[in-house]
Image: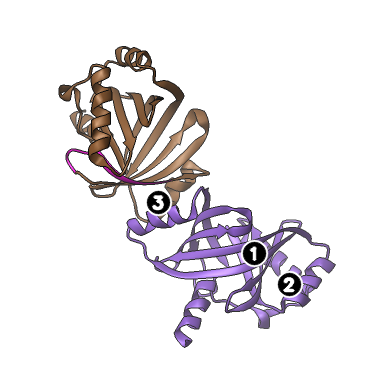
Chain colours: A purple, B brown
């Protein structure tokens, strides 16, 4: 199970805070995500990581809909982003939304920090732990959140694709 | 467009014939194909090539249903066979049939020869050309068929998954 909590953050301040607690920088990713029209609580995504020239097909099932912190995830790397999208479209799935972001990935012990600048939405930090013990994972996540100065008030429970959809509606 | 004609053959005789006309041996593959329950003329397959440790997700649309010689194909390599199957099953596709075969691949100019020993079904040769000129591709395929001693009588128009399904019905 993938357990993660998403926070709205100030990119530079949180970047310094993550580095100051000793998290190790892993990589930078320029991500383009296409979400296909699968009804919640399921998600179907094709991701291209432009700067690494890699692509992924990901299925997620949200275990706690609304809160969106617990995900049952299955992911494979694919050799071609566009062809994977084409296959899914031929099978009847429609393109729902595209999310583009610059993401810095850090790690400290078993905790992953994904600090993202999302096109049109601003900056977010996802703190993630892969574990089958949800309670222990959440304790770990909130301990880290506390150390970098984030609180319940900073949580953004909506999914990126929900935020993008709301943005497009307002236009 | 993928143009191919499938023949029922004697494995050893046809292997010698292909080699005698100067076709180049490309590789041997131990293939396990899982076809998902997509209605014809569409096909959805996940293939594991055991001996090469590679897997592929393939969508095909048969352009000449019944004859089954012209295919609009989209294929990507995937990093994990079982996970890819899992994703498709989560999306609602059911496993239809499994086809296991040993395949020798040869090439001569733009023509690919796929000589297969299919578990439960016997030996087959697929002669394949990738081209947007269907007529020219078929001329080339039949010229090669003639050179290795195969005729219209040897053609097997049914798909592997149809043959496996008929086999399972008879059991």
Name the disc covering residue A145, or none. Answer: 2
Q: CA distance from mark 2 to mark 1?
A: 15 Å
What percent of the width, then of the height, locates residue A162?
Answer: 49, 76
| Chain label for disc 1 | A
Q: Quick check: A118 above or below B41?
A: below
Sooner in the amino-acid sequence: mark 2 or mark 1: 1
The reply to whether the magenta stretch includes residue A27 is no
Image point (27%, 15%), residue name: B10
Q: Quadrant location of the C terminus of chain B?
A: top left
| Mark 3 residue crowding within 10 angstroms, few (<14) / some (14–19) / many (20+) | some
User: Residue pushed farthest left?
Assistant: B153
Q: Is residue B121 visible?
A: no
Image point (52%, 33%), residue name: B53
Disc 3 and disc 2 on one polypeptide chain: no
Q: Which residue is mark 3?
A: B88
Q: Which residues are magenta?
A: B65-75
Asked if disc 3 and disc 2 are in contact, CB closer than 8 Å, the reply is no
């Amino acid at each position: 199970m993938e357990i993660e909590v998403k926070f709205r953050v100030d990119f530079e301040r949180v970047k310094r805070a993550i580095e100051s607690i000793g998290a190790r920088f892993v990589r930078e990713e320029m991500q383009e995500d296409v979400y296909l029209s699968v009804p919640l609580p399921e998600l179907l995504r094709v991701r291209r990581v432009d700067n690494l020239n890699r692509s992924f097909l990901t299925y997620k099932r949200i275990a706690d809909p609304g809160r969106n912190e617990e995900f049952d995830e299955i992911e494979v790397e694919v050799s071609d982003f566009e062809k994977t999208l084409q296959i899914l479209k031929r099978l009847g799935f429609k393109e729902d939304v595209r999310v583009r972001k610059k993401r810095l990935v850090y790690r400290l012990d078993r905790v992953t920090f994904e600090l993202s600048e999302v096109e049109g939405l601003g900056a977010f930090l996802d703190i993630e732990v892969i574990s089958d013990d949800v309670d222990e994972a959440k304790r770990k996540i909130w301990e880290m959140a506390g150390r970098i100065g984030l609180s319940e008030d900073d949580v953004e429970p909506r999914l990126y694709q929900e935020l993008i959809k709301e943005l497009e509606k307002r236009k």
